Amino acid sequence: MPVCGGAGRVVKGQPFLRSFVTPAALCAFAFLAAMAAVLQYSVRTFVPGSLEPGGFALENFADLLKPLYARVFIDTVWICFLTAVFTLLIGYPLAYALVRLRNQFAKSFILITVITPLFLGEVVRTYSWIIVLGNNGFINSVLLKLGLIAQPIQFMFTTVGVVVALVHVTMPVMVVILAAALSHIDRNYLRAAESLGAGPIRAFATVTLPLSMPGIVAGVTTAFAWTFSAFATPQLIGGGRVNMISNLVYQLGFASFNFPFAASLCVAGLTLIVIILWLTRLAMRPLERIGPH
Amino acid sequence: MLAILAFLLLPSVVVVLAAFNDSALLSFPPHAWSLRWFAKAVEYRDFQEGLRNGLIVASWASAIALAVGAAFAFAIDHYKFRLKAPIEAVLLSPLFVPHFTVGLGFLILAAQIGLARTYTIVVVCHVILVLPFVLRSVYVSLRNLDRRLELAAASLGAPPLRVLATITLPLLLPGLVSGWLFAAILSFNEFTASLFVTAQRTQTLPVVMYNYVREYADPSMAALSVIYITATAVLLTLANAFFGLNKILNVEQH
């Protein structure tokens, strides 16, 4: 029997262990070093006009509480929340169709439509939305031509515009997670409900929906975290009037060269994400018991 | 359902309309059609260099991520070793760490160890960001791998390297190819972290496109987007036909 050995020691029965694990360990180390660099900068002071940070101090974190920055934090959480909820509402029917449809062609069509945006990158997708939402854009041109509106609706530089584009950006991840959860539900539960006289709506509400709860929670959390990471969408569609933490970090780093403060924003943002993930895990625990596995 | 699909497809359709529109100003419906924005996009020097840089970075990053990720996924599946769970957790965590934080981290790190403005730091950053996806693809293949085939080969006297080369690797091929494909596409498209770690000389295509959108409003960007969308859709359709995206994404009905 193979013996459990240290990462550095090749044990009989576990050939190539060292050469298989070392590169991964180096990558993990590089990532930890980058995160440590952020952490270290976050507790240094900013020396105006210099790229080198000053001494150690916690003043960056005190500055985060100023209304200007606190406001960006609240806006970010609000935008992430709205995006996660709308992505769920639109993504659920898609995931459901993806799993339940019999027609292979329709299935592949939905899958490709949903997945392609995932591989287009934020810039291309955001640019497309600028053309759709702009004052001379597609929606306004069509509505003006039809005489439904007298002047363009302002989507650019508004929270609504940013959220619409973000929902589109986040959709693929949500659908993939929901579809994975839905596909693991044992169809026999549904058959049982139907044979006991439940109509399709009741069977969905009392069987499918509760059983897909873990997927919903995972999808909403992931959508929240992804939106939190978005940069190009709020930057280009928000145009400086809708700001998320990512935009503030970039601006602080590349316009004011205040890397210590940018780093402290990153640390605060990461803390927020970790707390949200941790709370979700707590909330998931009772759900896992009724889950399909 | 149709409304939802329309919402998903709307931006792509509108970009196509804008790309073939002769006028420099966005107008719907277009008055005349032309291919001139495609010509302009293809001839634009910054786009060409961005494409070249993007391909260099994506090739290196996806190859390294594939090698590192496949080896580690195999070790996780087959072996027991110390620090297994912590290393795995660290390597999967970039899924939840905002990319601007990863980018800022590697920017500061690069400055500290003298790698600022190099391709190396861009590649390292991309490897870290795409590794979780490679790990996931290879895990799925490993789960479907019949361990008895490896044991049979070993009991017939095949040394470990031979088992690996003649049994394990061929059986893992679909997972390896799809993992590499995911890594290459994601690296090629990575934007936020790249914005932080690239310099003028190493700018990848998404960064060049972002700068272009900020400065100019003409539809060459729409033309480039159309090329992009077409290439991606073709790649994905091929991947779907050869490997089945359902399986890779784990959304098949059981």
Image: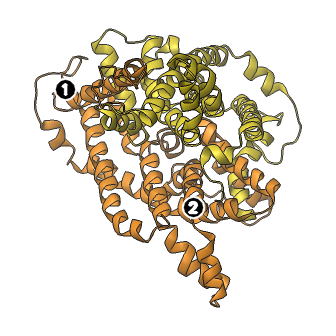
Q: Secondary structure at mark 2?
A: loop
Quadrant where the C terminus of chain B lies? Answer: bottom right
Name which quarter of the figure residue A30 lies in. Answer: top left
Q: Is residue A158 above or below residue A190?
A: above
Which hue is chain B drawn in? yellow
Please state which amino acid type lies under the numbered disc 2. His
Badge 1 is on which residue? A46
Height in image: A172 above or below B111? Answer: below
How many marks overall?
A: 2
Q: Between marks 1 and 2, how big is the CA–CA gap? A: 52 Å
Can residue A150 be seen at all in this image of the molecule?
A: no
Q: Which residue is mark 2?
A: A184
Residue furthest out toward the front: B156
Picture coordinates of residue B191 (x, y %)?
52, 31
In the image, residue A36 lies at what x, y percent?
Answer: 24, 28
**Which disc number belongs to residue B10?**
none
At mark 1, the secondary structure is loop
- Determine if marks 1 and 2 fall on one subunit: yes
| Lower position in the chain sequence, tag 1 or tag 2 | 1
What residue appears at the point 54 percent right and 50 percent down from the top-left corner?
A166
The answer to whether residue B166 shows anywhere in this view is yes
Q: Chain of mark 2?
A: A
Chain drawn orange in the picture: A
Q: Residue at x 58, y 38 (%)?
A: B145
Image vertical order of residue B42 relative to residue A135, above or below: above
